[in-house]
Amino acid sequence: MRFLIITKRSLLIIILCVILGIASISIGLNSVSEAVATASTERVIPIYSVDTKDKVCAISFDAAWGNEQTDDLLDTLDEYEVKTTFFLVGSWVKKYPDSVKKIAEKGHDVGNHSSTHAHMPALSADKMKKEITDCNERVKKLTGKSPTLFRAPYGDYDNNVVNMVKSLDMYCVQWNIDSLDWKDPSVEQIVKNCTDKLVPGSIILLHNGAANTPAALPKIIEGIKDKGYKIVPISKLIPKGGYTTDVTGKMILN
């Protein structure tokens, strides 16, 4: 008969293996638990585009810093009889009230781009709400209307941001076509960026302070119209009623 002799060293090795095994099981269970929790938290996505078969799209401008080119952009839009959407930061509204009034008087949407161009997901709920409502109040004081459209600075959002916007009866709007004009590419490249991937319901992102945007805007408008598209403000592009957004951010009526 053989006897199993367990030395102190062997015992320590056995105990260590048992501990490691238990730890591995614990880590595995935690991972499963975290995965289940993540899966149960549905990601809320803003509006990047609109589900439509009509050849219609929207041009939007973000205004956060300078104002040297705004009049040129408005003149071009007048010339082509096109209405668009301007997302304005509250500090910009305070600094350039006459431009805010002019944008509204010419029939363009005046959207909310926060009060100070903050990273919204980094804020508490109260500060996030204040960023939105302060800008709304400034715009309303100048135009008589409170914005119904919001675009997060830097395109930076999370579920809390989108849900806060919705709780204020506003639409959280992104874009599915980025002109990248803020990188100062050539006029031709900006036009290409805006027109090559155009689809029904597209929302195009431009900036009022990018160097080559004023020169590119006429060609963008012409390129869009040559493809048979109509350009409207985002408020006219978005259908009214209950909606959902798919994984790409396409707005679909319920």
Image (cartoon, grey):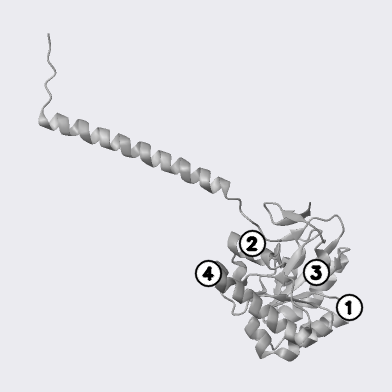
Provide the secondary structure element on which disc 1 rests. Answer: loop
Residue flagged by tag 3: what amino acid is it?
A: Ser
Mark 3 against mark 1, which lies toward the viewer? 3
Q: Marks 3/4: CA distance?
A: 28 Å
Residue flagged by tag 1: what amino acid is it?
A: Glu
Provide the secondary structure element on which disc 2 rests. Answer: helix
Residue flagged by tag 2: what amino acid is it?
A: Asn
Q: Is residue 16 left or right of residue 254?
A: left
Vertical position of residue 79 compared to residue 48: above or below: below
Mark 4 against mark 1, which lies toward the viewer? 4
Q: Position of residue 62 (x, y in %)?
A: 68, 76
**Residue 16 visible to an observer of this rendering:** yes
Image-quadrant location for residue 86:
bottom right
Residue flagged by tag 4: what amino acid is it?
A: Ser
Q: Marks 3/1: CA distance?
A: 17 Å
Q: Which residue is mark 3?
A: 235
Q: Which residue is mark 4?
A: 124
Mark 2 against mark 1, which lies toward the viewer? 2
Q: Which residue is mark 1?
A: 81
Q: Which residue is mark 2?
A: 163
Q: Nearer the viewer, residue 167 or 254?
A: 167
Q: Position of residue 48 (x, y in %)?
A: 71, 61
The structure residue drawn at horizontal position 63% and vertical position 65%, both measured from the top left corner, is 164
